[in-house]
Amino acid sequence: MTDHSTGLQIRSLIRPEGVLELSLVSVETPAPGPDEVVVRVEAAPLNPSDMGLLFGGADMTTAKAGGTPDKPVVTAQLPPAALRAMAARVGQSLPVGNEGAGVVVDAGTSPAAQELLGKTVAVLGGAMYSQYRTLKVGQCLLLPPGTTPEQGASCFVNPLTALGMTETMRREGHTALVHTAAASNLGQMLQKLCIEDGIPLVNIVRSQQQAGILRSIGATYVCDTSSPTFMDDLVEAVAATGATLAFDAIGGGRLAGQILVAMEIAANRNSTGYSRYGSTVHKQVYIYGSLDPGPTEFTRAFGTSWGIGGWLLTPFLQKAGPEAAQAMRERVALEITTTFASSYTKVVSLREALDLEEIAIYQTRATGTKYLINPNKGSGGS
Amino acid sequence: MTDHSTGLQIRSLIRPEGVLELSLVSVETPAPGPDEVVVRVEAAPLNPSDMGLLFGGADMTTAKAGGTPDKPVVTAQLPPAALRAMAARVGQSLPVGNEGAGVVVDAGTSPAAQELLGKTVAVLGGAMYSQYRTLKVGQCLLLPPGTTPEQGASCFVNPLTALGMTETMRREGHTALVHTAAASNLGQMLQKLCIEDGIPLVNIVRSQQQAGILRSIGATYVCDTSSPTFMDDLVEAVAATGATLAFDAIGGGRLAGQILVAMEIAANRNSTGYSRYGSTVHKQVYIYGSLDPGPTEFTRAFGTSWGIGGWLLTPFLQKAGPEAAQAMRERVALEITTTFASSYTKVVSLREALDLEEIAIYQTRATGTKYLINPNKGSGGS
C-alpha cells in the first residue's frame, strides 16, 4: 500500500483583481474516524458543473501557464461581469470535483468502515480532484464486484439527473419527455433509460451526426435544429409522444419557447372549438444547463398553461426524500456498466488537467469530448 | 316591466379573409326554466380579457364604420399572424362580455329563482354585452341591498384575480408580493386588499403620476420603471418585504427577469458563503396579462431556483375547489363598495360601444381609462 498521509489536490482561486488561478496543492489526509474511510481517488469526471466552479467564468482564451512542471499554475482573466457574479468566492482557494470513484485504502474502527477496506466505491463527495479523500461510510456507494473506478466514476451527476428527469415527469403528471443537447453523455444515458422504462423521448440535437449517435442506440424521435423542417418535425414528434415536459441544457436563445409552441400546437390538434386562452394542458420546460449563456427569449404563443423554470439535482433529491434517493443510487450501482455507463475521450492526471492544451480541448464541452481525471495516474497507486 | 322577449347583443366575427366584424344582433331571450332567472343587464365592464375576444387581434387603426345608426357594423383588418392565431374561431359569430350585473326581471318556478325576482345580482355568465340573459340561479351572486348594478358590475374578474393572487401566495408558501402595471383598476384593488390583509406588496409602475395614485391609497412600496434608480429601488423593496412571488400583467420585455434578479440579490444579502448555484429560495413570476405582446427576454442571473409561468383565474379557481371559490365570491359581495370597488371613466350603450371614437379611447387600455357598457342605457329599463 502506498503512503496516503498527504496527496495532491486541484485548487481554484479568484483573486480580487479578477484573475483566476488554478494550482496543485499538497494536503494532509485526515485520519479516518470510526465511521470513516480513506478513498484513493482513481477516476473523477470533468462535468460541465465542475468546469463552472473550476474556471469561475474566466476567459480561458487568456490562460497562461506558470509554476513548475511538478506544481503547475494556470492563470486567466475574468471579464468584469463574471467577477461581479463570483464576488462571494473571491479570495477563497476552492477544491473542485463533484464526484468520482476509487479504492478504500484505510478505514476506521467501525464494522461498516472495515467492511469497505479494499473495495471500489463511488462518491459524491466534492474535492474529488484529489489523490485521497477521507469520507463518511454513508457517502460511499459500494460498486458491484469487478466494477473499475473508471466505470464507477460518474455514478451520481448524470445517472441521478437522468433518473431525476423521469421521476420529475412521473411526479408532475407527464408521460413523455423532450430533451435538448440530447447527444451528450447525459442525453445518451437518458435515451437508454427511457427505452428501458418505456418512456417516449423526443431528442433535440443540432446536427445529423448527433442524430446518428442517438439513432444508433435506439432513439425513435430525433429532431435536428439545423434542419429546415425542424419545427414541423418537433410538432410531429411531440404530438406522437404526447410530451408536455422538456429538460433543456441550453438555456439561452429561443429553443425553450419553440418547444412550448410545439407542445401547444400538438395539444390543440385534438381540441374542439376555440379557446381564447389556449390549451388547458400544462406545458413545462425546465432549464438545467447553460450551454448558451445568452438571454432566453420567447414569444408567449402557447396559451396560459405553461411554465419555464430552473431545475437542479440536489433540490430535487431533497424533495424526493432519502428513501427515493437511496433507491435511485442503488439502481445506478446495479446498472453502472449498462444503462448508466459513461464513456470518456481521455484520461488525464491532475497535472495534465492543468495543461493548457488539454484545457483548450475539454473546456469546449463539445459533444463527444469528455475527460476523466485519474488523480493517481502514474503514481503507482493501482 | 319592459318587454324582455328579445334583446340586442354585441357579436364578434372573424371572416376567413382576415376581417373582423363587430355588430349588434337581436336575439330571443329563452324563457327561464324552473331554476333559472332572466337578468336585465345594466352594467358590464370592458376588461382587457373581453377586448381580446372582442377585437380578435385585429388592427383597430384600420377600423371602418358601416351598417345603420340602429345596427352599426365595425370592420377592421387582422394582420396575417393574428389570423393564424385565431384560426379556431374563424366564421363563428361570438357573443362577448365575461361579467356584469343587473336586475332579475323574470324567474322560474323554483323558490330559489322566485326569491331573486327584483333583486340586483352580479354574474360571470359570458355574453354579458346583451340586454337580457337567461341564467341559472347558481350563476347569480346576490348583491347586498342598496348595491347598484354599476357598483356590482366587476364582481368577478378583478376581485377574484386579486384574491387569487393572495391565495396563490399563501398556497405556494410566499409571504409578500410584487405586482406590475400596479396602477390599474386591478392593481389598486390588490393594494387595498393587501393593506386589509396585512400582506406586504411591491408595486411596479411606469410613471410618477401612477406612483402618486398608489401612494394616495396607502401604498408603501412603489417602484417606477422610468426612474434611473429603478433596479436599486426594486432590490430594496423586495429585500424589505421578502417578496419571492410576482404577478406580471405586462408579459413582454425584460421586466419579469429583472424582478427575478432583484429577488436573487435580496435573497443573497442574507446568505453566507458562496453557492455556485445561487440562492436556494424559490423565486416565481406568474405572467397573467400581455400589455406588451412582444417577446419575453431574460438573462438567467438568478440561480436555479426560479420559475416563470402563465397564470389564469379559471384554472386557479378549479384547483382551489368550489368551497374556497364560493368563500371568495361571498367576500367580494360583502366588500364590493369598499375593497373591491371599481371606477369607470365612461358608461356607454351597446351602440356607443361600437362607435369608432369610443373604441379608439377604450381599446388603448391606458391606466385610468376604463369603460362600462350599460346594454339598457336609454332603453328606459331602469
Image: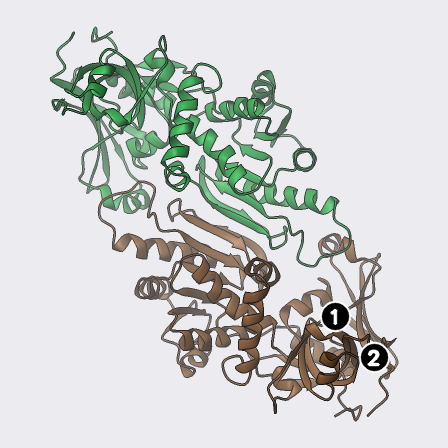
Chain colours: A green, B brown
Q: Compare residues A204 and B194 and report the one nearer the observer.
A: B194
| Pick the front one: B327 or B75 | B327
- Residue B57's x, y, as percent? 71, 62
Identity, as a three-letter code, of the amino acid under mark 2: Leu
Q: Are marks 2 and 1 on the same chain?
A: yes
Q: Mark yes or no: residue B190 visible.
A: yes
Q: Mark 1, chain letter?
A: B
Q: Position of residue B15 (x, y in %)?
A: 84, 60
Q: Please tell me whether residue B134 is drawn above or below residue A188 in the rendered image.
A: below
User: Which residue is labeled 2 in the image?
Assistant: B8
The reply to whether residue B373 is in sight is: no
When asked about the image quadrant of residue B75, the answer is bottom right
Residue B46: x and y in percent read 66, 75
> Which quadrant does the N terminus of chain B fall into?
bottom right
- The quadrant the C terminus of chain B occupies is bottom right
* Residue B347 percent coordinates (x, y): 68, 86
The front one of B136 and B163 is B136
Considering the numbered disc 1 on the image, is that residue within a helix, a strand or a loop? Answer: loop
Indicate left or right for A1 with B171 as reference: left
- Per the rendering, the mark at residue A345 is none
Q: Check if mark 2's residue and mark 1's residue have beta carbons within 8 Å.
A: no
- Left or right, A110 with reference to B135: left
Element under disc 2: strand
Pointer 1: what residue?
A: B96
| Count of numbered labels shown in the rendering | 2
Position of residue A354 relative to residue B126, above or below, is above
Q: Chain of mark 2?
A: B
Q: Quadrant of residue A2?
A: top left
- Residue at 68% x, 65% y: name it: B52
Instruction: Give the mark, 2 or 1, whose residue is nearer the N terminus.
Output: 2
The alpha-carbon separation of the residues under discs 2 and 1 comes to 12 Å
